Image (cartoon, rainbow, N blue to C red):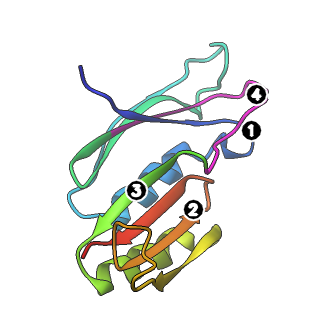
Amino acid sequence: MKTTTFLTFVNEQCGKTEEAMAFYTSIFPNSEIKTIIKYQEGEAAGTPDLVKYGEFTINGVPYRISENSYNHAWSITPGVSLFLDCHSEDEIDNFFEQLSQDGQIMIPLDNYGSDNYGFGKKFGWCADKFGVSWQLNLME
């Protein structure tokens, strides 16, 4: 068995899937868009300009993504986030700056010393401009 993160863009995120894939693959090394399948004309839940199914990688890790125009009672939540272990100050600072731009900072990027949540010496939590939540951690 294998698990893969699947992002669903609905409501205010609908129509931004291709932009999100391009954004993520431009930030992280060893990343690429693998597949984009669009809705067919007249197909339920979408129009030909929307992504029915997509696959991309972030640093070699596969992700799946989709969007649809149904009126859902839910959206992306920060209760589930992508956790990123970084190996240098420059790396964490750069990723946090890019990911938080036009998004929301939930926990500012900071050095936490002995109060470090138990997993790193620098940590920050943000949602990007698409609403996807990211926790960034500088490994010890």
* Residue underneath mark 1: 11
Q: Image height check: is 48 above or below 40?
A: below
Q: Amino acid at mark 4?
A: His
Question: Is disc 4 placed on a helix, strand or loop?
Answer: loop
Please state the horizontal and vertical placement of residue 24, each as a whole percent of the image. Answer: 41, 57
Please state the horizontal and vertical placement of residue 131, each as a whole percent of the image. Answer: 63, 54
Q: Are marks 4 and 1 in contact (CB under 8 Å)?
A: yes
* Residue underneath mark 3: 83
Question: Is disc 2 placed on a helix, strand or loop?
Answer: loop
Left or right of residue 104, residue 72 in this image? right
Query: Distance of mark 1 from mark 2, alpha carbons?
Result: 16 Å
Query: N-terminal of the two: label 3 or label 2?
Result: 3
Residue interval drawn in magenta? 63-78
Q: Main secondary structure of the magenta part?
A: loop
* Residue underneath mark 2: 128
* Residue underneath mark 4: 72
Query: N-terminal of the two: label 1 or label 2?
Result: 1
